[in-house]
């Protein structure tokens, strides 16, 4: 979807709703005058080509309808202006996707590796995050690049590879990793977590603003009873160690074999990045 399309759709829907509401409100407008030291409100409208006025100083319901009407009319004018601006911006938008930019540079450049042109982490931060989020993400980049103790459990099951060469266990985990790359979020895949009673290997480990870890687990096959049972036992193990959902543990899942990427993106934007 075009970056401006959702905003444009929302504005068009708002305008449609406001126009529908406006059509049900009475014609005419509200007038005000001061008479013998008191406030008076009048209802003005045209009837059979003639302008008519009637007092509504004590009619609060009619005052409210006319006030709402004036508000909707002015808001629709602003919406129309913004919609026109967005449509023009959409039609004139130039895609700044890095691969597309490189494709326009000419044949000599096509033979060069991507790292000659940009550094992925900084690029994704610059393109997708505001200044406050950029600072939070950048503060943790060094942590994400340090060596760590990664799980060696069943390495043969890591059959999927991300765009940065990370081996993971499922296509859904590839998609999650790619979304994290997009937003420049540092993470560690299957970092071993040692507790007093056992070792864990969370799918994704992050570090919060106080340098404390928090985790994301992906449940890939909840329609498989044996997998669902193992997943729930793992969640309970987390809880027994004081790592609780909604606090230190986030969970994503496949539904009918499909990962809902808007949900993943919302978790990254609303749950992960604000904690960095």
Image: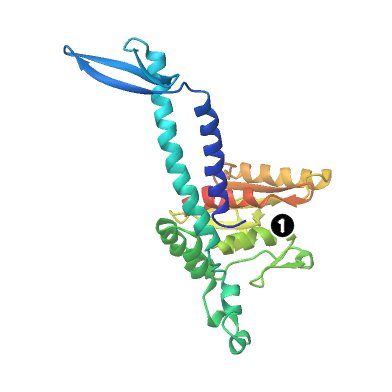
Determine which quarter of the picture holds residue 176.
bottom right
- Residue at the farthest front position: 49
Q: Is residue 254 left or right of residue 91?
A: right
Q: In the rendering, at what x and y percent does residue 11 appear?
A: 52, 43
* Nearest to the observer: residue 248 or residue 109: 109
Q: Which residue does the image show at 56% across and 75% down from the upper left?
A: 101
In the image, residue 46 above or below residue 6: above
* Nearest to the observer: residue 124 or residue 253: 124
In the image, residue 162 above or below residue 80: below
Q: In the rendering, at what x and y percent does residue 144 appear?
A: 53, 66
Q: Is residue 246 left or right of residue 52?
A: right
Q: Which residue does the image show at 63% across and 46% down from the upper left?
A: 238
Which quadrant: the N terminus?
Answer: bottom right
Q: Is residue 62 left or right of residue 222?
A: left
Q: In the rendering, at what x and y percent does residue 80 appear?
A: 47, 44
In the image, residue 116 above or below residue 175: below
* Nearest to the observer: residue 117 or residue 161: 117
* Nearest to the observer: residue 243 or residue 186: 186
Q: Which residue is mark 1?
A: 172
Determine which quarter of the picture holds residue 135.
bottom left
Q: In the rendering, at what x and y percent does residue 159 appear?
A: 77, 67
């Amino acid at each position: 979807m075009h970056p401006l399309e959702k905003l444009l759709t929302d504005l068009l829907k708002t305008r449609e709703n406001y126009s529908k509401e406006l059509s049900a409100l009475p014609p005419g407008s509200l007038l005000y005058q001061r008479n013998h030291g008191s406030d008076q409100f009048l209802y003005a409208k045209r009837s059979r080509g003639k302008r008519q006025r009637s007092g509504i100083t004590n009619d609060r319901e009619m005052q409210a309808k006319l006030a709402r009407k004036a508000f909707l009319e002015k808001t629709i004018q602003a919406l129309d202006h913004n919609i026109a601006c967005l449509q023009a911006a959409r039609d004139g938008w130039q895609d700044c996707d890095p691969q597309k930019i490189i494709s326009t540079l000419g044949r000599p450049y096509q033979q060069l590796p991507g790292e000659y042109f940009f550094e992925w982490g900084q690029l994704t931060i610059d393109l997708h995050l505001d200044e406050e989020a950029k600072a939070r993400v950048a503060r943790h980049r060094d942590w994400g690049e340090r060596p760590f103790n990664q799980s060696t459990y069943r390495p043969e099951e890591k059959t999927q590879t991300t765009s940065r060469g990370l081996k993971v266990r499922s296509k859904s985990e590839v998609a999650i990793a790619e979304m994290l790359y997009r937003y420049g979020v540092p993470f560690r895949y299957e970092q071993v977590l040692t507790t007093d009673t056992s070792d864990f290997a969370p799918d994704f480990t992050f570090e919060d603003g106080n340098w404390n870890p928090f985790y994301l687990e992906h449940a890939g096959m909840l329609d498989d009873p044996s997998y669902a049972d193992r997943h729930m036992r793992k969640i309970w193990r987390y809880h027994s160690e004081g790592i609780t959902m909604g606090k230190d543990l986030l969970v994503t899942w496949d539904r009918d074999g499909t990962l809902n990427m808007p949900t993943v993106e919302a978790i990254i934007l609303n749950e992960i990045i604000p904690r960095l």
